[in-house]
Amino acid sequence: MFEHLDDPRPPVFGAAARHAVVRRVHRRRRRQLAGGMGVAAATLVAGADGLYGRAAWRLGQVERTEVAGTADVPAGEPVTFLVRGVDARTGPDDAGRSDTLLLARLDPGAGTASLLSLPRDLLVTDPATGADVRVNVLGADAQVAVAESQLGVPVDHVVEVGLDGFRALVDLVGGVEVRVDAAVRDTRSGLFLDELGCVTLDGEEALALVRSRHRETLDDSGRWVVDPMADLGRAATQRAVVVAALADLAGRADPISVDRLAGWLAEHVTVDAALDAGDLADLVRAALAVDPAAVTVAQLPVTIAPGDDSRLAVDETLAPAVVDAFRTGEPAPAGPLEGEPAVAAC
């Protein structure tokens, strides 16, 4: 049945035919190679997208709560946060005391950031009762109202971080590098730094540093000297540590780093309900892109409160200029009461 396959005159293939076959084989190999490279590239992209996708999912798991006065901000516009550091992760609307209070302004378009510290012993008017109280005893709703109506700083969003979250963030970035100019200690917070120069602090050491309110410095004679401006110095130290943390975070926009940061946010941070996952993702990217050299820091100008040496009051003469500088991202003039930080950014 196969007799017809035996051609008595088989075809003869010349050089041209052989070249055509070779070219087809080469084209097929190039397509296979290109296809393989395409699959590999697609796999890598899918892996990155997968990690970014997981980070986006984690940002959606960040705890949110209603805070009066907060609202969405158009993409790319400057955003002002009220950052509350608390001893326990209780939620921004809880009336528990905030151990740290900081206003932060992020300008994604300019790639800059500004920090303005509010002393915990600052006397303000409670919006609910009209009584004079320390700002740190108020809940987030009242603190937002105070910032806007009594300090003149519009607040878009609220971010709350527990002290355990701060410690975890420092460990996440591999520690923060700070400059120690003199040995310092605080027996109450557990702070003890005797190595001078630029040193790297782990989470526990950094936490003891930013919590220090009874700081002592070793002078040239070998005596431990109590810092009389401990609360303001504490705020200055906190700003220095935040800048150091930003320096460690700068440029970490790779998928793995973003995913880890998103995991930290989901575990340790609470934000207001107006800040959705997409907006939070945009702000995280903007924060990672900020050059630490482009961060301006300031302390709200204060004076000793009349009749109470243990409390502080807003310096009505100097505060407006500092607030205006903060709102525009410009360096602020110093106030009459400025604490000396225990450390500085390297």
Image (tube, helix red, strand yellow):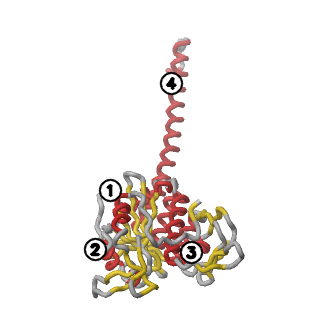
- The residues tagged by marks 2 and 3 sit, at their Cα atoms, a distance apart of 32 Å
- The residues tagged by marks 4 and 3 sit, at their Cα atoms, a distance apart of 68 Å
Residue 181 placement, left or right of 298: right
For marks 4 and 2, give the one nearer the viewer.
Answer: 2
For marks 4 and 3, give the one nearer the viewer.
Answer: 3
Write down the residue under mark 4. 24
- The residues tagged by marks 1 and 4 sit, at their Cα atoms, a distance apart of 56 Å
Specify the quadrant that holds the C terminus.
bottom right
Q: Is residue 297 above or below residue 99?
A: above
Q: What's the amino acid at mark 3?
A: Leu
Label 3: which secondary element: helix
Q: Earlier in the sequence, mark 1 or mark 4?
A: 4
Write down the residue under mark 1. 77
Q: Earlier in the sequence, mark 2 or mark 3?
A: 2
Position in image of residue 192 (x %, y %): 65, 76
Label 2: which secondary element: helix
- The residues tagged by marks 1 and 2 sit, at their Cα atoms, a distance apart of 22 Å
Disc 2, disc 3: CB below 8 Å?
no
Q: What's the amino acid at mark 4?
A: Arg
Disc 1, disc 2: CB below 8 Å?
no
Q: What's the amino acid at mark 2?
A: Ser
Answer few, some or many: residues within 10 Å of disc 4's Cα (few below 14, many 20 plus, some between 14 and 19). Answer: few
Position in image of residue 40 (x %, y %): 52, 44
For marks 1 and 2, give the one nearer the viewer.
Answer: 2
Answer few, some or many: residues within 10 Å of disc 1's Cα (few below 14, many 20 plus, some between 14 and 19). Answer: few
Write down the residue under mark 3. 207
- The residues tagged by marks 1 and 3 sit, at their Cα atoms, a distance apart of 32 Å
Towards the viewer: 66 or 180:
180
Towards the viewer: 67 or 64:
67
Answer few, some or many: residues within 10 Å of disc 3's Cα (few below 14, many 20 plus, some between 14 and 19). Answer: many
